[in-house]
Image (spheres, rainbow, N blue to C red):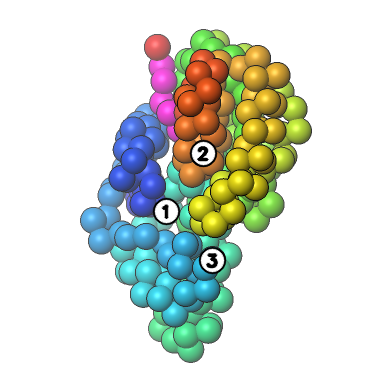
Amino acid sequence: MRIGLFVTCLTDTLFPDTGRAVVTVLERLGHQVDFPAGQTCCGQMHFNTGYRREAVPMARGFAAAFGGYEAVVTPSASCASMVREYYPALAAGAGDTGLARAVAEVTPRTYELSVFLADVLGVTDVGAYFPHTVTYHPTCHGLRMLKVGDAPLRLLRAVRGLNLADLPDAEACCGFGGTFAVKNADTSSAILDDKLDAIVESGAEVITAVDMSCLLQIGGALSRRGLGVEARHLAEILAETA
């Protein structure tokens, strides 16, 4: 299958190893992965803060960059949610029938990585080996909007050597919420403190998720506290073989 990698802004600029891990896993499974150079931000930050008109060109650019692929895969449930759930509304609000057609064609083929692997390809064992105790944080967009379900957990359970630890109150937010963490820093930090306590209680060496945005929030706090727990994206775990 010819797949377009939608790497997202955060991954591209701050966590390129996550993008490389996605490519490693998909190529290991025999797929051709391309990186369309024309891709840009999905426009989620603009959309969420009320700048919907400014987000329209980003939806148009996405459709142009990824229109020719059998599937578009991203390591971000948050950005996948933006594309799948809100691009149709953007196109409709703009009154652009051409954009609406392009969006209708590409959005159903846009997938978050774990959903693509476990539910679209029907693969849970990707040949990974990761001998560590890991706990999984279900991110808000993945859990409540994209509804990735247990796809990440099925993938983690199939990793050789991995001990999957339960995360207490797992479905609680980490406090990031994009611009929420900036505009409501005190509230965000209080929510994050609860999440860190849960991670420590789990006994995990590694906390994983399907959004680098949440792992940025969690990983930064873990490092500042010196808790000795590493934050790693699911793709990075799945890419490990030794």
* Residue 46 occupies quadrant: bottom left
Label 1 vs 3, first from the N-terminus: 3
Task: Give coordinates of residue 226: x percent, y percent.
Answer: 50, 18
User: What kind of residue is marked 3?
Assistant: Asn
- Residue that appears at 66% across and 40% down: 190
Tell me which amino acid carries mark 2: Gln
Q: Quadrant of residue 68?
A: bottom left
Identify the residue at image location x=69%, y=52%: 144
Calculate the distance from the C-alpha at mark 3 to the C-alpha at mark 2.
18 Å
Is 179 in front, or is 36?
Answer: 179
Looking at the image, residue 227 lies above or below residue 238: above
Q: What residue is pinned by disc 1? A: 72
Q: Pointer 2: what residue? A: 217
Q: Which residues are magenta?
A: 234-241
Amino acid type indicated by mark 1: Val
| Residue at mark 1 to residue at mark 3: CA–CA distance | 23 Å
Whichever of callouts 1 and 2 sits on the residue coming sooner in the sequence is 1
Q: Callout 3: helix, strand or loop?
A: helix
Farthest left residue in view: 37
Disc 3 marks which residue?
48
Task: Tell me where residue 71 appears, x and y as whole percent.
Answer: 43, 53
SS of the residue under disc 2: helix
Residue 31: x and y in percent read: 36, 40
Q: Are marks 3 and 2 in contact (CB under 8 Å)?
A: no
Q: Can residue 165 be seen in the rendering of this structure?
A: no
Name the magenta segment's main secondary structure: helix
Apparent side of residue 67 relative to residue 93 in the rendered image (left or right)? left
- Tell which of 66 and 83 is nearer to you: 83
